Image (cartoon, grey):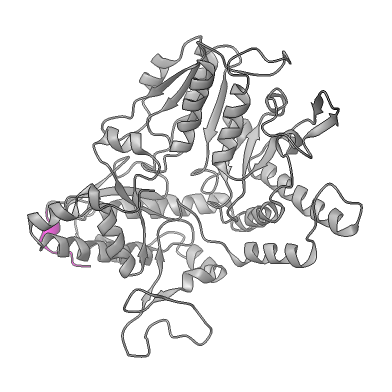
Amino acid sequence: SDDGDDNSDKTNNSNSKSWWKDFQLKDSTLAPSVIKDFPILATSFDADGKIISPTPSSDADGSADGKQNKRLVYLDSAATSQKPNAVTSALTAYYEHANSNVHRGAHALSREATEQYESARDKVASFINANSRNEIVFTSGATEAINLVATALSNTCGQPPKNARDLYLTKGDEIIITESEHHSNIVPWQMVAERTGAVLKYVPACAATGGFDLDAFTELITPNTKFVSVQHVSNVLGSINPVDEIVEIVRSKAAPGAKIMLDACQSVPHMGVDVQKLNVDFIAASGHKMCGPTGIGFLYGKESVLNSLPPYKGGGEMIDEVYMDHSTYAPAPARFEAGTPAIAQAIGLGAAIDYLNKIGIERIHDYEVELADYLRRRLEDVKGVTVLGPPVGTERAALCAFVTEAVHPSDLGTFLDVEGVAIRAGHHCCQPLHRALGYSHSARASLYFYNTKEDVDDFIAVLEDTLKFFGSLGSDAIEEADSDDNFVPLF
């Protein structure tokens, strides 16, 4: 990219504006060693931006008419990660060699499917250091995991349940969330408050960084606080919330027995998460963000807490005994897995965990911390870019959301896409947070362990070229392009 006078008002830890050219990652072999496991990363694009499917004989550098093809730079892993061969092969192997329903058959295929499905549960439990495999409930994703808990706590509409041991929320109980949450950790609790009469309170986003305000959180916690649900890592800011302090405050100031849920979608794929050390009551996570298939995720819950929740859905598998006038229910996790589960997807998630374990989650975390800092510093050098979240030098997750003076995120995403760079543009399911920070939308580049320094450099080069192009159009054209009326991808 061009590091001319346009960047003279930007500063960096290095005295040279070309510091990045000599920068080397400490673990520079990680990404190159795994890229071959992700065939989609070999995708390239022709001069018109159309996908060229990779084939053994295809030329990734040139096309038939001699024009230069563009390689895929995938910077959208916070939305969904790519899938290694180990995962797609596990899915194919299940359907070709073990396809059957689980738990229900006496034949060999059913036994094999059940063994693979339940083995995946064991792998999830071990990955997050759950105390028991019974603490892992398979769901369609983190959104369903959060809704499962929210619905179970509110299905009596605030009235005492028939089973006095069941947990429930009622009028006057307080639920605490934050302004920075993903919509899937806001909307369900709004519904709970409407159904039960509970009071929904939120911690305002820090005006400077959007980060977690522990002082404001402490003030909100009262003896009426019955439930707290917060992100572990922000999918917009990249900030890592102080879970130890949050748990300590809740345990000391909230109602006895108050429960804590952690939205761990952006932490479980990227860092070691030990639920016993965290001492939260629930976590929700998505399989597709950790190299697993779509349509699978999990809810972790302390076993005693799960067994004090009423069922979420009724049907087969979740029952103990069924009579015509009443039914009794199985203990967790079966209590919350009514019907035929996502068998193949769960097996695929197990394969993804095997793959991550083979690399090592600590190695992944250390690599991403350094690469995220590099991305943050490179963006800091780009004139007209404001990065949301923690400042340079503060540890962040491997993502950066940002806004620019020259171009709307939608247009920016479109122009980068033409050059083969895949980022996300929109409010990232965090409208309240964006409003609090004074923006309607932002662009976001997010990384995973298969990304390289070259990915970041190529992204920055295209970003700088795009900003220069829009800057040359004049203020009237920029204002028209910057109108939210022209914005299409609202997700």
Residue in the foreground of this view, choosing between 396 and 402: 402
Vertical comparison of 383 with 322: above or below: below
Residue 126 x/y as whole percent = 69, 43
Residue 327, compared with residue 412, is above or below; it is: above
User: Residue at (67%, 45%) from the top-left corner?
Assistant: 124
Please identify the dominant SS of the magenta region.
loop
Q: How many marks?
A: 0
Q: Looking at the picture, tell me which residue is in the foreground, 436 or 41.
A: 436
Q: Nearer the viewer, residue 403 or 359?
A: 403
Residue 120 appears left or right of 422: right
- Identify the residue at horizontal 31%, vertical 85% (top origin): 67
Q: Nearer the viewer, residue 278 or 477?
A: 477
x, y (%) of residue 377?
A: 28, 52
What is the magenta range? 1-8
Could you say where residue 270 lies in the image, as x and y percent from the top left?
51, 48
Magenta stretch holds residue 110: no
Q: Quadrant of the N terminus?
A: bottom left
Q: Residue at x 40, y 20 (%)?
A: 217
| Residue found 69% across the figure and 28% down from its top | 306
Q: Is residue 7 magenta?
A: yes
Which residue reaches farthest front?
324
Quadrant hosting residue 68: bottom left
- Residue extending farthest to the bottom is 65
Using the rendered view, name the quadrant where residue 374 is placed: bottom left
Q: Residue 135's spot in the image, x, y percent? A: 70, 35
249 versus 34 height, above or below: above
- In this rendering, the answer to whether 258 lies above or below 57 is above
Quadrant in which residue 141 is drawn = top right
Decide if residue 42 is in sight here: yes
Residue 279 seen from this side: no
